[in-house]
Image: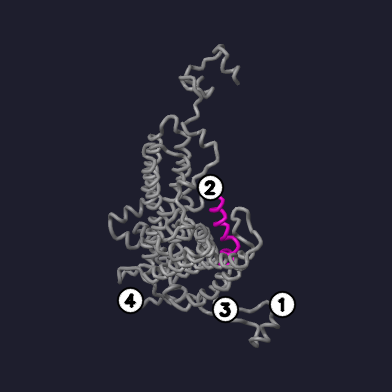
Amino acid sequence: MADLRKRPNKGTDLDTETENEATNQDSDGNIDLDSEDDKSLSKKMDLSNTIPTGTDKAPEMLDATLSHLPPRWRNWVIRGIFTWLMIIFFALIIYAGPLALMIVTLAVQVKCFAEIINIGYAVYKIHGLPWFRSLSWYFLMTSNYFFYGESLVDYFGVVDNRTEFLRALVKYHRFISFSLYIGGFVWFVLSLVKRYYMKQFSLFAWTHVALLIVVTQSYLIIRNIFQGLVWFIVPVSMIVCNDVMAYMFGFFFGRTPLIKLSPKKTWEGFIGGGLSTVVFGLMISYVLCQYPFFVCPIEFNEELGRMTLDCEPSPLYRPQEYTVPASIAPIVRMITGKNTVMIIPFLLHSLSMSVFSSVIGPFGGFFASGFKRAFKIKDFGDIIPGHGGIMDRFDCQYLMATFVNVYISSFISMDSPQKLLQQIYSLKPELQLELFTALRDSLTTRGILQIAAP
């Protein structure tokens, strides 16, 4: 390679600038590494002194009170106190209603995005590169406009179509969202700076991965909430239960390491947490199914002018009679005196969710552990004493939210009347009239609709 660089420029039409780029040299004869910090990037990352951690952090008064305890028990007490505080806060938010839940979901999403992006900034040491922080937050707002707008269009389109201005936003929502994104894309290209291309494209990719992990998943959480609070509360509670019980079983009985990514995780904790989650999931599902507030889909009541949770619970949440398989029929007959059992169908779906949260859910935490170990950081942040950052507590929740949304769309959901109405109102008047005539004739033929003779 050295001989090639010394060879005279014979038999080639490369100009000086192109030849310099081909040999990785700049006009001064220096090796162009794309930026001043590429040498440091080639070394192992260690951000432990840059990213604050909260696992060992505690308020001064609490820290002084627990100073006599061994570090292991001190952390156990701090973690327990703030776990209960988070559970209480979660219960208060549920009591406040679906709108409060959506606002908190958005706030959590923004904080998780900030924690991930801050690590990216620390890794690539942007040296004040123009506009990049602004671009990251611009893409976050653009993504939220698209995803949250999709939910509003689906569930409140009937109301939105009454106003000319809102009707235009509904009709052209995706085009507006695309235009906003393209504006950010052009802004990024114009902000590129020579010798920092690698850093800038790396951060561009980092931002989009953060958007995929955080914004998309929070959008799915909102979609789950609209199906009924039970589809939000049960999965979230399962992850909390699994996390807490796995920690407890591991703390007191853990002996066998589970995975190298998380050395403190043990098989005893994994199994104990899993079994506890299955039992807890069935119990909380049974309780919530007794209350329409938790099982009714969220719909906009035009008469009241607000979202409501009032409905006649569907058969999914009421006991149904099932015939048991022949293999276990004798056992069931001995207990109940017949070959059938009464089961609330949602409990069967709850069982599926509890198995996923116990077996697959922890892998969201393992993924986050691998990410943190790659950069030698202990936590994503220090906002929650004894736990770390918001992302440290929601790594498994996002994975669970995706599963629940896929599960609902695959096995549960049907188009709601409100969503169908929204689609009908978006049609041209002549098409609406044609649909009305066809529906009226069909209902009359089947004897559902009686039309009085003129």
Q: Residue at x 44, y 33 (%)?
A: 196
Mark 1 crowdedness (10 Å alpha carbons): few <14, some 14-19, many ≥20: few
Place residue 279 in its image quadrant: bottom right
Tell me, yes or no, whether the highlighted magenta stretch contains residue 367.
yes
Q: Amino acid at mark 3?
A: Ile
Ranked by sequence position, the earlier of labels 4 and 1 is 1
Residue 206 locus on image (x, y percent): 47, 44
Mark 4 crowdedness (10 Å alpha carbons): few <14, some 14-19, many ≥20: few
Cα separation between marks 3 and 4? 50 Å
Residue wearing tag 3: 343
Residue wearing tag 4: 454
Q: Which color mode does the image show? A: one colour
Residue 207 locus on image (x, y percent): 45, 45
Mark 2 crowdedness (10 Å alpha carbons): few <14, some 14-19, many ≥20: some
Q: Residue at x 33, y 53 (%)?
A: 169
Residue wearing tag 2: 376
Cα separation between marks 2 and 4? 82 Å
Residue wearing tag 1: 327
Q: Which residues are magenta?
A: 352-373
> Of residues 367 and 334, which is closer to you in this image?
367
Which mark identifies residue 3? none
The answer to the question of whether label 2 and label 1 lie on touching residues, with beta carbons closer than 8 A, is no
User: Is any part of residue 205 visible from this angle?
Assistant: yes
Cα separation between marks 2 and 1? 54 Å
Q: Amino acid at mark 2?
A: Lys
Q: Nearer the viewer, mark 4 or mark 1?
A: 1
Magenta portion: prevailing SS class: helix
> Of residues 68 and 78, which is closer to you in this image?
68
Q: Quadrant of the C terminus?
A: bottom left
Looking at the rendered structure, the secondary structure element under dot 3 is strand
Q: Residue at x 65, y 88 (%)?
A: 337
